Image (spheres, coloured by chain):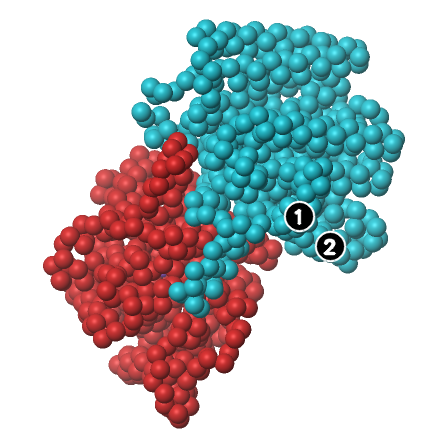
Chain colours: A cyan, B red
């Protein structure tokens, strides 16, 4: 631990706490506008600010501006999500909206990890400011993930991210140029949010719900201020949200290239194509099955099918239909989709498209090597060679992910949950989706789960959100030695 | 398909059919001794011999003795297990022991793949000769696997086998020296069988049951001629079988080295050590839990715990206790063990110890690279570098294995089975274990499953047994082109 500099860690966390208190103050403003109590937000904001200030001064005392090392980065990232989630649960507790500590933490973790699984049985009875805060945690979590996955992880070479998310010139250090990219991404994120709010307002949704839903969409979060999620809105609204979910599941580097008019890079991006093709095929299949087996009209089947498929694949979790009422094979496909995940460099969670692509490339190469074992067949992604380290990292990731999934499911079965609920709640929480199957379907919630299950799922949400390695490394002995 | 030589394929299959008819004649002899009908075996033997002869002459017509190519080998291996299983189901059908075609095929596939899952509800009512045949299919399947995994697959460089199962000098071609090794392995296999028969006879088991159980143990098959498997026998018998299951789960190259007095190679074999350590730790844990939570005496707990743990880890599937009566956490550990598998180069199935070792080494390296990303840390196995190709092959294998497991489980759920039964029957059939959990536990059987489930499980038994790649490649377009 000799070369471990806690000051850098503190400085970053203090910055994040300042951002958090600003967000809390905004929610406080919403409370004033809605004539609700400001106390929960004000008290939490003061606490967050005070702790932030303390950490800031602790970090400044012997100010050495050395850059963040890898080890420090892992701790910072995990601590950030943990501290944000714990602090963010206070408004729920202070306002009495969620009386149980476990529940409040679950809801807050679900917010900041952009999961959207909820323990609330009746959402609409809660104060508007609390619901605003709940959606805002998604939005903050989403921007955090964009920054983490597009800027921090590639720079730290975590999980092979530097190889498929950014140009190589940007990979070396968190340079001024990367900061420029960061600001671009922030613009894109805000533009998407604003555009969606405007389009929702145009469809007759009020400003409060438009904002909450836009936060939930762009962050692929899935919290809705309405009990029936998006089901009660007009087809127009549902189409708008489908399109924005689809956009939110795209690597944010794609709109960046679009702005830069670098169309070649977009055409070469295999994950982008793969993502669109997968969504299209599964969407069409489900739509046809809803027409055929449930007798829905073409438009309804198309709208309902694509909404649900896009919502699950992009790990958003909004719903316009209870897919558990669909034919069994249709909702089993939805369960499968929980293992897909959107694109890297988006706010979507899960295994993600590019990793599936790489696994498929590996399988194909093994098959080709089986026939001609002396052929050297390199794995290429986006016309570039994928090196051994990145490839192993991806394969190990998928293996670990599936092992954590099986282990988590078994533990929940052990806690007395049925198989479908166990497997799907682990799958949905690890991938940051929201609803599952069984007793945690889209019209149900996580309230009835035992406390231990809620804690385990909270841990899995953070572990999944931070791409597993980032959290697991903190438990590896080699991390803490020297 | 231009360079595809069906003649070589035919020649090998015809040889296998000759072996099969010999085995059928032996079972016929058992029928004569037991005063049972010989017809089922005689008729099948004649058929197998006739088809074998036909193929032999078809293959001989323009005899070109060119060696087996890779493509031909895959087809041969899969066809061999398929044809053996289909032919082997005839005695069940002709004798009327198993009237349903699907059931007879399931039982036969389960035999030749050394799985040991059974559709029989009452085993003891069947003719002795049929039960002998049933156990003999295990024994034939077991020797087939040893030859496949230690000799054929390394020579064909399938699944990275050439890197961890044999010395490099033996890897190039199926050379005369490899044939010598093959004969050694056959000796070891037969010696183990004979030794177990003698020790079981010494414990008072009759010659018929001793032979059947020895076949089932050495092949890690698990079919027993008794309804309650090994539960009704004396502790001595149970200990003998535990030890022989443990031996059968060891890479057969270890006794080969032992005979050659190459102790260094044994000491360096990481999989061997890992296997023993894993069995020991899980066995002790389960034994303690049986003492503590079920109030069993130390000896009973130790015997029962180790028997079940060794039986599942080595993929044998014999039982002396119904683990579903154990505390939930204990049988969930048993479910986990279904994903372990014994050693490579043994008759055990599943993912296997060495692959888990390699996954763990990859995880460790990723963690170490996270801290010091510029370090080149090679993966070593048995003091040798594991090359990229073999490493990728192992990682992809585990990923594919888990994906096939999840897909299979979902399909069985789709067919109306409950979660525990679905997941565990897929896990147990893919790994060639035998019993599962839920409604296919150690005191139950597979009779009640829908026909479609039995067919899917039969396919999974063969796919799992032949290490997935061997079967899947037949469905890859690149296999059939050119
Ligand atoms: K979500
Ligand atoms: K078995």
Label 1: element kind? helix
Q: Chain of mark 1?
A: A
Q: Residue at x 70, y 31 (%)?
A: A188
- Please tell me which residue is depicted at 80% across the width and 14% down the height of the picture: A34
Question: Which comes sooner in the sequence, label 2 or label 1?
Answer: 1
Left or right: B211 as drawn, with respect to A210: left
User: How many marks are shown on the rendered structure?
Assistant: 2
Return the x and y of residue A67 as percentages of the image width and height: 47, 21
Marks 2 and 1 sit apart, C-alpha to C-alpha, by 28 Å
Q: Which mark is residue A209?
A: none
In the rendered image, is residue B478 in sight?
yes
In the image, residue B336 lies at what x, y percent? Answer: 40, 46
- B51 relative position to A263: left or right: left
The quarter of the image holding the C terminus of chain A is top left
Neighbor class of circle 2 (other Cα within 10 Å; few <14, some 14-19, many 20+) is some
| Image position, residue B356 (x, y; %) | 36, 48
Write down the residue under mark 2.
Answer: A284
Chain at tag 2? A
Pointer 2 and pointer 1 on the same chain: yes
Quadrant location of the N terminus of chain A?
top left
- Residue under pointer 1: A264
**Residue at image point 45% right, 53% down:** B396
**CB of mark 1 near ligand 1 (< 8 Å):** no
Left or right: B434 with respect to A99? left
Q: What residue sits 60% from the left and 26% below the top?
A: A179
Q: Is residue B469 visible?
A: no
Residue situated in front as seen by the camera: B95 or A77: A77
Left or right of B308 in this view: A220: right
Residue A413 on image: x %, y %: 50, 40
Q: Quadrant of residue A320?
A: top right
Residue reaching furthest to the left: B261
């Amino acid at each position: 631990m000799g070369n471990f500099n806690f000051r850098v860690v503190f400085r970053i966390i203090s910055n994040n706490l300042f951002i958090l208190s600003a967000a809390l103050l905004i929610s406080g403003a919403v409370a004033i506008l809605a004539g609700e109590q400001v106390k929960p937000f004000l008290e939490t904001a003061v606490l967050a600010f005070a702790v932030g200030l303390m950490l800031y001064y602790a970090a400044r005392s012997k100010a050495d501006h050395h850059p963040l090392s890898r080890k420090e980065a892992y701790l910072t990232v995990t601590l950030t999500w943990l501290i944000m989630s714990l602090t963010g649960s206070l408004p729920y507790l202070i306002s009495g909206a969620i009386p149980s500590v476990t529940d409040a933490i679950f809801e807050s973790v679900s917010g900041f990890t952009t999961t959207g699984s909820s323990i609330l049985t009746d959402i609409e009875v809660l104060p508007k400011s609390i619901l605003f805060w709940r959606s805002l945690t998604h939005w903050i979590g989403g921007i955090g993930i964009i920054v983490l996955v597009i800027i921090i992880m590639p720079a730290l070479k975590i999980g092979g991210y530097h190889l498929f998310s950014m140009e190589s010139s940007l990979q070396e250090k968190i340079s001024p140029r990367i900061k420029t990219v960061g600001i671009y991404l922030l613009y894109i994120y805000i533009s998407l949010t604003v555009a969606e709010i405007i389009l929702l307002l145009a469809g007759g949704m009020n400003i409060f719900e438009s904002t909450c839903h836009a936060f939930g969409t762009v962050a692929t979060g899935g919290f809705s201020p309405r009990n029936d999620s998006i089901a009660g809105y007009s087809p127009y609204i549902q189409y708008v949200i489908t399109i924005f979910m689809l956009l939110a599941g795209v690597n944010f580097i794609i709109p960046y290239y679009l702005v830069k008019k670098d169309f070649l890079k977009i055409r070469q991006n295999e994950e982008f194509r793969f993502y669109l093709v997968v969504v299209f095929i599964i969407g069409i299949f489900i739509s046809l099955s809803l027409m055929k087996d449930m007798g829905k009209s073409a438009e309804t089947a198309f709208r309902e099918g694509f909404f649900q498929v896009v919502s699950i694949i992009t790990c958003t979790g909004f719903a316009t239909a209870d897919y558990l009422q669909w034919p069994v094979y249709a909702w089993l496909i939805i369960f499968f989709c929980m293992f897909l995940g959107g694109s890297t460099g988006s706010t979507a969670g899960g295994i993600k498209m590019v990793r599936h692509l790489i696994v498929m490339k590996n399988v194909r190469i093994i098959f080709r090597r089986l026939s001609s074992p002396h052929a050297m067949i390199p794995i290429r992604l986006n016309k570039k060679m994928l090196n051994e380290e990145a490839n192993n990292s991806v394969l190990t990731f998928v293996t670990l992910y599936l092992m954590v999934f099986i282990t988590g499911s078994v533990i929940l079965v052990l806690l007395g949950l049925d198989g479908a609920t166990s497997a799907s709640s682990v799958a949905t929480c690890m991938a940051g989706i929201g609803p599952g199957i069984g007793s945690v379907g889209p019209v149900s919630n996580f309230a009835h789960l035992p406390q231990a299950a809620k804690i385990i799922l909270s841990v899995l949400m953070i572990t999944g959100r931070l791409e597993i390695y980032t959290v697991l490394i903190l438990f590896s002995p080699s991390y803490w030695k020297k």
